[in-house]
Image (cartoon, rainbow, N blue to C red):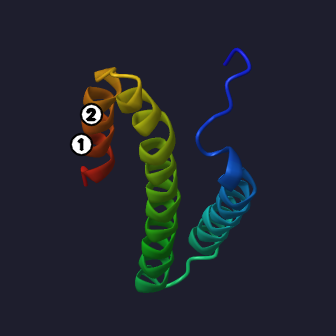
Amino acid sequence: MGGVKPAYEDDKKALLSRLNRIEGQVRGVARMVAEDTYCIDVLTQIGAIKAAIDQVGMLLLEDHVRGCVADSVRAGETDKIDELVGAVKRFTKA
């Protein structure tokens, strides 16, 4: 990125920790399927993974708005607003 600090830099440690936890949850679900675990129990864990992913996404989105978008607007540039709207649309699709 040419020396520019990403907006999520301050949350990087927390983001990586959450992503590592999610990775472990996904491995756990794979193990549950391999062990023929009851469907509802697997679905419950998948719901937990989805919620955790959403939390990571919201933190990144918040950092983007407070950093990249705010800086762009202060500079009189509006391209980041359209980018943000697109990101929100993609993020909120089920």
Cα distance in 3D space between marks 1 and 2: 5 Å
Which three-letter amino acid code belongs to the residue tagged 2?
Answer: Gly
In the image, 27: left or right of 75? Answer: right
The one nearer the camera, 3 or 41, is 3
Q: Is residue 38 left or right of residue 25?
A: left
Q: Is residue 70 left or right of residue 27?
A: left
Question: 90 or 30: nearer the eye?
Answer: 90
The residue that appears at 70% across and 14% down in the rendered structure is 2
Amino acid marked by disc 1:
Lys
Image label count? 2
Secondary-structure class at tag 2 = helix
Q: Residues within 10 Å of mark 2 (few under 14, many from 20)?
A: few
Q: Are marks 1 and 2 in contact (CB under 8 Å)?
A: yes
Q: Position of residue 51 (x, y in %)?
A: 44, 70
Q: Quadrant of the N terminus?
A: top right
**Point 68% across, 32% down: residue:** 5
- Residue that label 2 marks: 86
Q: Is residue 50 left or right of residue 86?
A: right
Image point (61%, 74%), residue name: 32
- Asked which secondary structure carries label 1, the reply is helix
Q: Is residue 56 above or below residue 29?
A: above
Q: Quadrant of residue 9?
A: top right
- Residue 89 is labelled as 1
Rate crowding at label 1 as few (under 14), some (14 to 19) or many (20 or more) other CA atoms within 10 Å: few
Query: Relative to residue 18, is residue 60 depicted above or below?
Result: above
Q: Residue at x 44, y 65 (%)?
A: 50
Specify the quadrant that holds the C terminus. Answer: bottom left
